[in-house]
Image (cartoon, helix red, strand yellow):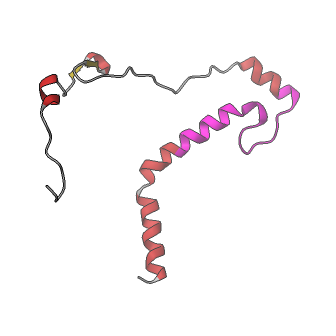
C-alpha cells in the first residue's frame, strides 16, 4: 500500500470515529477549564485580583460528574433508572451449567 493511501485511510478513521472521541474530548476540556478557572483555565491568562474576587463572588456550584452505582452480584436484581426493573440474567441454575469452549479447538 503506498504512503498516500495509508494517509487517506488514517484520516478517514479519525474523521469517522469523531462521534466517539469528540464528546469525550469536549468533556475533558470543560472539566480541566473548570478545575483551573482560578488560574485562568488551560490556555487563558492568569486573572487579576479583581477578577478573582468576582469569581469567588459568583460562587459557581461545582457539579460532580461522577456516578456511583452499586455492584450487582449474580442472582440479584438491579434497580434500573426511570423506575424500571431488570432481572439479572444469571441464576444459580444457569451458573451451575458448564459452558462450551469457544473457538476452533475442542
Q: Residue furthest bottom?
A: 2
Q: Is residue 92 above or below residue 13?
A: above
Picture coordinates of residue 53, whole percent (x, y):
82, 22
Q: Does residue 83 appear left or right of residue 67 in this picture?
A: left
Q: Which of 106 and 7 is in front in this view?
A: 106
Predominant SS along the magenta part: helix
Q: Is residue 19 above or below residue 11?
A: above
Q: Residue at 54% across / 45% down in the picture?
A: 25
Q: Residue at 42% across / 55% down in the picture?
A: 17
Q: Residue at 66% across / 21% down in the picture?
A: 60
Picture coordinates of residue 62, whole percent (x, y):
62, 22
Specify the quadrant of the image occupied by residue 39: top right
Q: Is residue 80 above or below residue 95?
A: above
Question: For residue 37: magenta?
Answer: yes
Q: Residue furthest top?
A: 83
Q: Does residue 61 appear left or right of residue 93 in this picture?
A: right
Q: Does residue 8 appear left or right of residue 37 in this picture?
A: left
The magenta region covers: 25-51
Q: Residue at 86% across / 32% down in the picture?
A: 48
Picture coordinates of residue 52, whole percent (x, y):
81, 26
Q: On the rendered image, what quadrant is the C terminus found in?
A: bottom left
Picture coordinates of residue 1, whole percent (x, y):
41, 82
Q: In this view, does 53 lie above or below 7?
A: above
Specify the quadrant of the image occupied by residue 2: bottom left
Question: For residue 39: magenta?
Answer: yes
Specify the quadrant of the image occupied by residue 74: top left
Amino acid at each position: 500500500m503506498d504512503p498516500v493511501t495509508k494517509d487517506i485511510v488514517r484520516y478517514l478513521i479519525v474523521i469517522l470515529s469523531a462521534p466517539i472521541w469528540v464528546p469525550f474530548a469536549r468533556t475533558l476540556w470543560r472539566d480541566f477549564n473548570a478545575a483551573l478557572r482560578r488560574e485562568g483555565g488551560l490556555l487563558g491568562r492568569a486573572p487579576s485580583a479583581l477578577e478573582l474576587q468576582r469569581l469567588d463572588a459568583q460562587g459557581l456550584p461545582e457539579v460532580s460528574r461522577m456516578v456511583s452505582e452499586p455492584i450487582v452480584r449474580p442472582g440479584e436484581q438491579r434497580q434500573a433508572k426511570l423506575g424500571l426493573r431488570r432481572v439479572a440474567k444469571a441464576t444459580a441454575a444457569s451458573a451451575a451449567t458448564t459452558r462450551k469452549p469457544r473457538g476452533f479447538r475442542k
